[in-house]
Image (cartoon, rainbow, N blue to C red):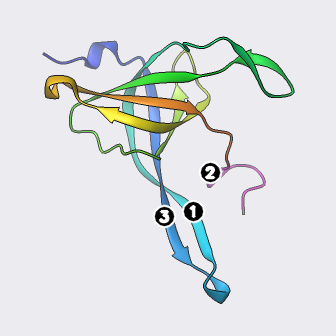
Amino acid sequence: MSIRHLLDHTGTVWRIQRSLGALNAEVRTYVQVAQVPVGVRRRRAPQGNPGPGLTPTGTRVLYFEAGVDVRARDVVQLTAGPDAPERLEVDDLSSPRGHHIEAEGRLWPGVLPGDEGAS
């Protein structure tokens, strides 16, 4: 049985790519891996201060269909759906009975390629 009808967001999965730049300094960039349907469970933490002002913080659970290429440390950028725009870094993955993928994520404040001011 598919969970596709529960996936009410569209997300872009970004993966970090490391290379050596000038003077052998590590250069980190993000490359787009896939655009996939995603389900998102609401935050399960109290209000916090991630910067200016209070906002709900804490982990979120992302749901994907089985077989989606998502890994720990990937960034999932929600591009459509009730919680878009939002960016979550994947902390932990599980696949209950191989039926679907559950990923714990936390808010990610970084810069992705194509962002205004990105270099």
What residue did someone put label 1 on? 29
Q: Position of residue 9 (x, y in %)?
A: 45, 22
Between disc 2 and disc 1, whose residue precedes?
A: 1
Residue 112 marker: 2
Q: Is residue 114 magenta?
A: yes
Quadrant containing the C terminus is bottom right
The mark that comes first in sequence, 1 or 3, is 3
Determine crowd level at label 3: few under 14, some 14-19, many 20+ residues with C-alpha closer than 10 A: few
Contact check, label 1 and label 3, Cβ < 8 Å:
yes
Q: Element at badge 2?
A: loop
Q: Residue at x 60, y 22 (%)?
A: 58
The segment highlighted magenta reads 111-119
Q: CA distance from mark 2 to mark 1?
A: 8 Å
Q: From the image, which quarter does the N terminus lie in? A: top left
Mark 3: amino acid: Gln
* Element marked by disc 1: strand
Q: Residues within 10 Å of mark 1 (few under 14, many from 20)?
A: some
Q: Which residue is mark 3?
A: 17
Q: Residues within 10 Å of mark 2 (few under 14, many from 20)?
A: some
